[in-house]
Image: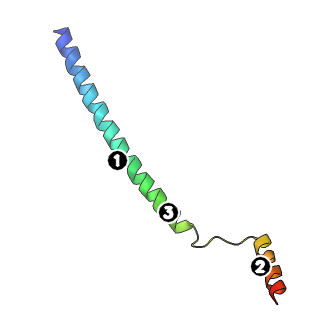
Amino acid sequence: MFNEIWDNRMVQFNERAQQLEEEMIEKHKGELEEFLRSLDESLPEKPKDSSELLNMRKIEQSLVK
């Protein structure tokens, strides 16, 4: 009698744990997709050039002339 009740509780527990794990995986997938979408929107298309690079380009242009 006790073993049957215990086995039943363990089966219910394992089923609930599996269900919660699947729900958490789906939640994390959604959060990851939302994060990647917001990251794509917040990053600029072209990175900003450094002041050193701009200075080197200016020097290069003056040497070309």
The CA distance from mark 1 to mark 2 is 49 Å
What residue is at 31 percent from the left and 40 percent from the top?
A: 22
Expressed as whole percent of the image width and height from the top left, the position of residue 64 reads: 80, 86
State the separation of the CA atoms marked 3 and 1. 18 Å
Quarter of the image for residue 57 reads bottom right
Q: Quadrant of residue 59?
A: bottom right
44 over 34 or under it: above or below:
below
The image shows residue 61, relative to residue 43, as above or below, that is below
Label 2, secondary structure: give it.
helix
Q: Secondary structure at mark 1?
A: helix
Name the residue located 23 percent from the left edge and 26 percent from the top edge: 12
- Mark 3 or mark 2: which comes first in sequence? 3
- Which residue is under mark 3? 38
For marks 3 and 1, the one nearer the N-term is 1
Q: Earlier in the sequence, mark 1 or mark 2?
A: 1
Q: Residue furthest front?
A: 64
Q: Which residue is mark 1?
A: 26
Please say if 16 is above or below 50: above
In this rendering, the label closer to the viewer, 3 or 2: 2
Q: Is residue 1 above or below residue 11?
A: above
Between residue 46 and residue 20, name the one nearer to us. 46
Q: Measuring 51% from the left and 65% from the top, which residue is drawn there?
A: 40
For the C terminus, give its image quadrant: bottom right
Extreme residue in the bottom direction: 65
Q: CA distance from mark 3 to mark 2?
A: 33 Å
Does the CB distance between marks 1 and 2 fall below 8 Å? no
Q: Amino acid at mark 3?
A: Ser
| Residue at the spot of label 2 | 57
Q: Amino acid at mark 2?
A: Arg
- Numbered badge on residue 56: none
Q: Is residue 53 left or right of residue 32?
A: right
